[in-house]
Image (cartoon, rainbow, N blue to C red):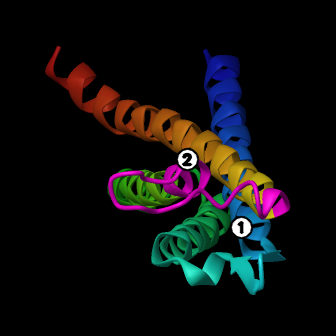
Amino acid sequence: MESITKARKICHLLLRFLAFGATLSAVIVMATSHEKASVLVFQFEAKYTNTPAFKYFVIGNSLVTVYGFLVLFLPPESFLWRLAVATDLVFTMLLVSSISAALAIAQVGKKGNSHAAWLPICNSVPKFCNQVTGALVAGAIAVIIYMILLLNSIHRVLDPLILRKC
């Protein structure tokens, strides 16, 4: 029984470390995405700071990265783990909302919007679009891992409460 508990703790720690790595990767890749291009006589630079949704993505993932780093050092038997359920929920929703906003803008950048007369830009700045895609993939992986962590955290907190009633 003790080996199962130890294996669960190691698995939980590994998931937390993977989540930290995914959010950190998403921040670094998005923050370093930029490319200069010229169309006809116009020159422009595509960078993440030009789009509020991409800024929100970087800020959201940065906050979750810091949280993920701090939680790695939380003592396993601490009462603060019960608080981690609530904070996991908040930060998971932050990740979901930030990636949703960034995906919407990335789709417009890739496909354009003919109804609004917005032209796609990915043909002009492919390196930028590829980096944004990489950041969004890392962000999606982080969302999936945080959802697994959230379910695991809920189970860890509720399981003793359910067993007490039996």
| Nearest-to-viewer mark from 1 and 2 | 2
Q: Looking at the picture, does residue 109 appear above or below residue 161?
A: below
Mark 1 residue crowding within 10 angstroms, few (<14) / some (14–19) / many (20+):
many
Q: Name the residue under label 2.
A: 111
Task: Out of 53 and 116, give the one closest to the viewer.
Answer: 116
What secondary structure prevails in the magenta region?
A: loop
Residue 108 belongs to the span the image colors magenta: yes
Tell me residue 7's x, y (percent). 70, 25
Q: Can residue 16 be seen in this view?
A: no
Q: Is residue 95 visible?
A: yes
The span shown in magenta is: 106-127
Task: Out of 52 and 64, give the one closest to the viewer.
Answer: 52
Q: Name the residue under label 1.
A: 30
Tell me the kind of residue under disc 1.
Met
Task: Out of 53 and 119, give the one closest to the viewer.
Answer: 119
Question: Residue at 55% across / 47% down in the picture?
Answer: 111
Disc 1 element = helix
